[in-house]
Image (tube, rainbow, N blue to C red):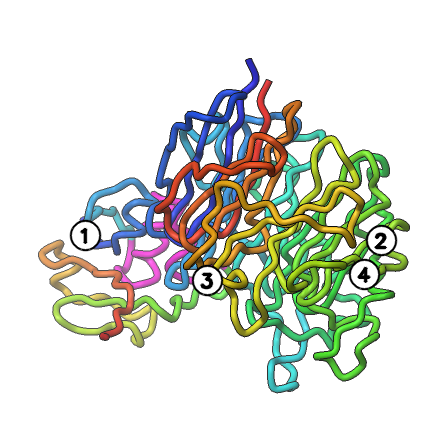
C-alpha cells in the first residue's frame, strides 16, 4: 500500500506527518530541531528517505540538516554558504546600496535523479548547489551577478530566493524566483540566467512593466508540461506557456488576487490551486473564511473549496512554500497556516480535514508519495 | 579541562548537556577554546562565530567569572579560574526584556 509523508517546517521546529494512502489517520512525529525556525524540509525524488532541512535562528545562524531514513534521525550537514568572489551590493529599502549578506536558506530543491545533489535558495538572493549531500556548498554566481542584480531590492520578507524548479524534460533548465526581483530562467544548468518577467505588471514599482523588480511570491509547474508555469505574484495570478518568455494574468473571478501559495494538481495540468489573502497589509484570508480556490481551466475561472475549512472568524495566512500535492490516484492537496494547522484533502480539494491543529506557525509543507 | 556552558539551542544541536569539557592545547583564549569546541562538535561551526571571519555572532555574548568578555580580543588569555577549570566559559544568547 502506498503511503504519504508530509514534511512541515514551522517557526519552532519541523514535523513529519505520515499516513497510508487513505490519508485519514496520521502519525505526527516531532518537533525536530525544537525552538529553531525551519524554513523548508524537502526530500529527494531519487531517494525519498534522503531529506534535507533548513534550520536557522537569529542568534545562531544557519544549520543544514540531512536525514537518510525519512526523518527518523538527522545529522548536521555543511552550513557554510559563502558568496563567490566579492559579493557587491543590491538596493536597500531606502534605495541605498547594501552589501550582499547571507541570512538563511529559504528553499531546498534536491536533484531529480541524484540524492546527493541539492540546490539551496538563500537570502540575500543567491543559488547554491551541493553535490556531496549538503557537506559543502558552492554558489552558482551568475544569477546573483545578473546585470540587473545591483537594482534588486528586498520585499518585506527579505531579498530571498524562494522558488527553485528543475525542469524534468530539459535537464539543464532551472527556474528560480526572487522577492522582489522577479523570475529567472537558466537553460544551461545555472551558468547564465535570463529575467523572465515580460507581461508582469506591478503598480507598486516606478516602472510597472520593468524587466525586474516584481514581487513574485511563488511559481508552480506540472512536470508533464514544463513550459507552462503558474505564478502567484504579490498581486495577480499569472500564467506562461512559453517557459516564462511571456506571462498573462489568470486571476479571473478570485475574491482577491493577492496571495502566496500556488500549486498544480498532480494528474491534471490545468487544475490549479491558490489561497487568496486579503491584501499586502492584511495578511489573512478574506472575510474570516479560509478558502482554497481551484481552477480546472488553467486559470480565470475559480471555484471556492470550503468543505471542512473554517468559514467564520478565521484570520490565518498561508505562506508561499506551505502548499503541496501528493501523486496518489486521487490527488491529495495539503497546506499549512500561520495558525499552526495543516489541512489535507484526499479528494483534490473537494473536502478538507486538519491533520494537526496546533503546531507553531507553518512556514512550509512538502509532500512525498511513497510506494 | 576547560568547561564551556552552551545556550539551550546549541546543546540540542550538539546533543550535549548544559556544560562540556574541552582539552585546549597552548594558550587558553576565546579563539582556542572555540577552535577546540568546533573541532569536538563540528555541527556548531558557524553558530557561534562566522566561519570565515571568526567574528562572534552579534546576538551571542561570552561571559566568565562574572565578567562580560565579549568585546575582549579573541586572543587574550581567559581568566585563570577558567584555565584552571574552576569557572566555566559561558556562551550566552542575548536576552531582551519585555
At horizontal 86% and vertical 47% (from top left) the residue drawn is A188
Q: Please determine if labels 3 and 1 lie on a single subunit.
A: yes
Answer yes or no: do the residues labelled 1 and 4 have beta carbons within 8 Å?
A: no
Q: Label 2 to label 4, Cα distance in Å?
A: 9 Å
Q: Secondary structure at mark 3?
A: loop
Q: Label 1 to label 4, Cα distance in Å?
A: 61 Å
The residue singled out by tag 2 in the image is: A240
Identify the mark at residue B50; answer none if there is no mark.
3
Q: Chain of mark 4?
A: A
Res. A232 image quadrant: bottom right
The residue singled out by tag 1 in the image is: B3
Answer yes or no: do the residues labelled 3 and 1 have beta carbons within 8 Å?
A: no
Q: Image height check: is A212 above or below A28?
A: below
At horizontal 22% and vertical 66% (from top left) the residue drawn is B78
The residue singled out by tag 4 in the image is: A249
Q: Chain of mark 3?
A: B
Amino acid at each position: 500500500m502506498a503511503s504519504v509523508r508530509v514534511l512541515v517546517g514551522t517557526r519552532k521546529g519541523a514535523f513529519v506527518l505520515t499516513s497510508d494512502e487513505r490519508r485519514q489517520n496520521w502519525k505526527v512525529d516531532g518537533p525536530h530541531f525544537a525552538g529553531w525556525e525551519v524554513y523548508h524540509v524537502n526530500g529527494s525524488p531519487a531517494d525519498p528517505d534522503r531529506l534535507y532541512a533548513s534550520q536557522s535562528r537569529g542568534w545562531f545562524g544557519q544549520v543544514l540538516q540531512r536525514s537518510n531514513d525519512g526523518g527518523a534521525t538527522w545529522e548536521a550537514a555543511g552550513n557554510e554558504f559563502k558568496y563567490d568572489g566579492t559579493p557587491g551590493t543590491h538596493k536597500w529599502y531606502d534605495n541605498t546600496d547594501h552589501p550582499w549578506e547571507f541570512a538563511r536558506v529559504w528553499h531546498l530543491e534536491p536533484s531529480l535523479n541524484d540524492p546527493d545533489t541539492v540546490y539551496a535558495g538563500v537570502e540575500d538572493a543567491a543559488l547554491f548547489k551541493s553535490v556531496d549531500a549538503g557537506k559543502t556548498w558552492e554558489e552558482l554566481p551568475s544569477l546573483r551577478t545578473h546585470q540587473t542584480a545591483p537594482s534588486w531590492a528586498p520585499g518585506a520578507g527579505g531579498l530571498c530566493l524562494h522558488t527553485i524548479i528543475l525542469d524534468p524534460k530539459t535537464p539543464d533548465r532551472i527556474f528560480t524566483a526572487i522577492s522582489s526581483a522577479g523570475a529567472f530562467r537558466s537553460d544551461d544548468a545555472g551558468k547564465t540566467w535570463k529575467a523572465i518577467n515580460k507581461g508582469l505588471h506591478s503598480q507598486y514599482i516606478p516602472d510597472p512593466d520593468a524587466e525586474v523588480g516584481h514581487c513574485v511570491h511563488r511559481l508552480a509547474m506540472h512536470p508533464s508540461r514544463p513550459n507552462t508555469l503558474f505564478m502567484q505574484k504579490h498581486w495577480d495570478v499569472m500564467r506562461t506557456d512559453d517557459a516564462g518568455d511571456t506571462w498573462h494574468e489568470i486571476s479571473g473571478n478570485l475574491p482577491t488576487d493577492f496571495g502566496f501559495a500556488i500549486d498544480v494538481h498532480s494528474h491534471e495540468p490545468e487544475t490549479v490551486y491558490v489561497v487568496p489573502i486579503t491584501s499586502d497589509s492584511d495578511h489573512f484570508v478574506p472575510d474570516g473564511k479560509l478558502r482554497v480556490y481551484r481552477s480546472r481551466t488553467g486559470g480565470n475561472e475559480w471555484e471556492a473549496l470550503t468543505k471542512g475549512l473554517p468559514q467564520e472568524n478565521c484570520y490565518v495566512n498561508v505562506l508561499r512554500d506551505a502548499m503541496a500535492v501528493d501523486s496518489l490516484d486521487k490527488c491529495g492537496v495539503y497546506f499549512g497556516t500561520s495558525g499552526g494547522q495543516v489541512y489535507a484533502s484526499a479528494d483534490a480539494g473537494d473536502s478538507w480535514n486538519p491533520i494537526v491543529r496546533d503546531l507553531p506557525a507553518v512556514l512550509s509543507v512538502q509532500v512525498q508519495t511513497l510506494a | 579541562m576547560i568547561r564551556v556552558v552552551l545556550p539551550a539551542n546549541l546543546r540540542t544541536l550538539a546533543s550535549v548537556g548544559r556544560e562540556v569539557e574541552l582539552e585546549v592545547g597552548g594558550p587558553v583564549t576565546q579563539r582556542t577554546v572555540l577552535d577546540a569546541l568546533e573541532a569536538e562538535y563540528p555541527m556548531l561551526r558557524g553558530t557561534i562565530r562566522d566561519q570565515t571571519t571568526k567574528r562572534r555572532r552579534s546576538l551571542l555574548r561570552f561571559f566568565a567569572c562574572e565578567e562580560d568578555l565579549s568585546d575582549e580580543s579573541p586572543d587574550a588569555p581567559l581568566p585563570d579560574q577558567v584555565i584552571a577549570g574552576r569557572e566555566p566559559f559561558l556562551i550566552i544568547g542575548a536576552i531582551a526584556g519585555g
